[in-house]
Image: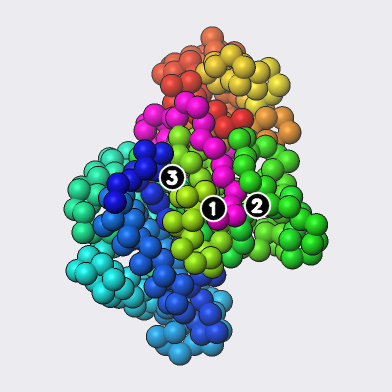
């Protein structure tokens, strides 16, 4: 069977926690069907497929006979450590059975693995090599036993988007428990309509996802929108759809399954810019005035000390920082030339004053435009 020319060649599939849990802490029924689909996409249609999975804590609960999800962080991490082995055993067994000998490659990541530019490149090279092994399916998960933020926020959506950007994927499919993004909460309002296509993720679109504690954010729609932002900026199509639908991957690729499609940017970020924007842990915030906002957003200028209103966080030179406008809206992310204490001394000052204040002038810019990615 030949692959249609409009098919993506490389796909990242994110499988959410809700699809892997049932009456017990873990239920592999849906996973079984997804594995069968992925086998078909690889063996019949020749596509590269990478999985980003949740479910380690649920598997650990199942293995340990726990009825309630642990609350204390050390217990969550311990349960995740137990569950990770069982989760991978399920994947390995299913692919060997349905893939007639196919195998999996496990990769556990934390944000720290992406902070280093060299590690970032090493991960990319590893993935590229795994894709040449046609009988191997990479399975990636946040390292739940050490990554405290993952356990607190459950943000494998962002991980999936960063991996899609890093792996030069054509399409990111985020599978969850709803058909996509709605204009209202479909569980409260029967008139809610599915938004089929999003060409630009505006503040109005983000507002539809609700807050972290709202009913509207059930299924983590807010984190999924953040993931979509990352994917489209990197030139990757992103689709959010329900993993409960049978043959959902084939239906999505055929344009049949209900879903929300986030269209990619016309000009994708370079890999270095992707690393700056999405690969680094953000360590602080620089709030800039209206003049600096215009210079950055409309004129493509570097950030100078005179435009900085305030500095939040403690960080060293070279750290990734977010840049926000006077209202607090994020407009850019970049690498700071100076540490936070030095920037606080320089804020609001003219460039020619740097040498007299510091006794030297290593950089005229706080964040150079070559080390900055606009997010506005």
Q: Upstream in the sequence, badge 2 or badge 3?
A: 3
Crowd tier of the residue under label 3, counting other residues whose Cα lies within 10 Å: few below 14, some 14–19, many 20 or above? many
Q: Residue at x 45, y 77 (%)?
A: 29
When the figure is inspected, residue 283 is found, relative to residue 25, above or below; the finding is above
Crowd tier of the residue under label 1, counting other residues whose Cα lies within 10 Å: few below 14, some 14–19, many 20 or above? few
Residue at the far top: name it.
352
Quarter of the picture containing the C terminus is top right
Mark-to-mark CA distance, 1 and 3: 16 Å
Q: From the viewer's perspective, tell me whether residue 349 is left or right of residue 84.
A: right
Residue at the far bottom: name it.
65
Magenta stretch in the rendered image: 256-285
Q: Upstream in the sequence, badge 1 or badge 2?
A: 2
Figure quadrant of residue 43: bottom left
Q: From the viewer's perspective, tell me whether residue 329 is left or right of residue 59.
A: right
Q: From the viewer's perspective, tell me whether residue 327 is left or right of residue 318.
A: right
Residue pointed to by mark 3:
171
Q: Is residue 343 visible?
A: no
* Residue closest to the eye, 108 or 39: 39
Figure quadrant of residue 62: bottom left
* Residue closest to the eye, 168 or 43: 43
Mark-to-mark CA distance, 1 and 2: 16 Å
- Mark 1 or 3, which is nearer the eye? 1
Q: Position of residue 160 (x, y in %)?
A: 44, 52
Residue pointed to by mark 1:
256
Count of all numbered marks drawn on residues in the image: 3
Q: Position of residue 230 (x, y in %)?
A: 50, 41
Judged from the image, the secondary structure of the residue bearing numbered disc 3 is strand
Q: Is residue 265 magenta?
A: yes
Residue pointed to by mark 2:
181
Q: Is residue 229 magenta?
A: no
Q: From the viewer's perspective, tell me whether residue 304 is left or right of residue 187.
A: left
Q: Residue at x 72, y 47 (%)?
A: 207
């Amino acid at each position: 069977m030949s692959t249609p020319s409009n098919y993506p060649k490389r796909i990242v599939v994110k499988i959410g926690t809700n699809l892997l849990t049932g009456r017990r802490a873990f239920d592999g029924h849906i996973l079984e069907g997804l594995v069968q689909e992925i086998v078909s996409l690889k063996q019949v249609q020749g596509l590269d497929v990478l999985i980003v999975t949740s479910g380690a804590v649920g598997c650990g609960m199942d293995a340990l006979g726990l009825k309630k999800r642990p609350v204390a962080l050390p217990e969550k991490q311990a349960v995740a450590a137990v569950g990770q082995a069982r989760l991978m055993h399920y994947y390995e067994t299913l692919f060997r059975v349905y893939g007639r000998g196919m195998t999996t490659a496990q990769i556990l990541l934390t944000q720290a693995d992406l902070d280093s530019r060299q590690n970032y490149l090493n991960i990319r090279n590893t993935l590229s090599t795994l894709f040449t092994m046609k009988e191997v399916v990479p399975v990636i998960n946040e390292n739940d036993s050490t990554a405290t933020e993952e356990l607190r926020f459950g943000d494998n959506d962002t991980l999936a988007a960063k991996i899609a950007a890093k792996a030069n994927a054509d399409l990111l499919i985020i599978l969850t428990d709803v058909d996509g993004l709605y204009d209202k909460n479909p569980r409260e309002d029967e008139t809610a309509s599915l938004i089929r296509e999003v060409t630009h993720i505006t503040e109005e679109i983000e507002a539809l996802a609700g807050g972290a504690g709202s009913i509207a954010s059930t299924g983590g729609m807010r984190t999924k929108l953040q993931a979509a932002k990352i994917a489209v900026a990197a030139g990757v199509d992103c689709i959010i759809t329900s993993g409960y639908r049978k043959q959902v991957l084939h239906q999505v690729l055929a344009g049949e399954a209900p879903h929300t499609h986030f269209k990619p940017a016309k000009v994708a970020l370079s890999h270095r810019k992707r690393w700056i924007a999405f690969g680094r842990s953000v360590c602080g915030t620089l709030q800039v005035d209206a003049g600096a906002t215009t210079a950055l957003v409309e004129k493509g200028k570097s950030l100078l000390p005179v435009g900085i209103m305030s500095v939040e966080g403690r960080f060293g030179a070279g750290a990734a920082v977010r840049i926000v406008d006077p209202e607090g809206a994020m407009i850019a992310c970049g690498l700071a030339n100076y540490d936070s204490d030095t920037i606080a001394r320089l804020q609001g000052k003219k460039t020619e004053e740097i040498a007299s204040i510091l006794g030297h002038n290593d950089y005229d810019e706080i964040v150079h435009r070559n080390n900055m990615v606009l997010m506005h």
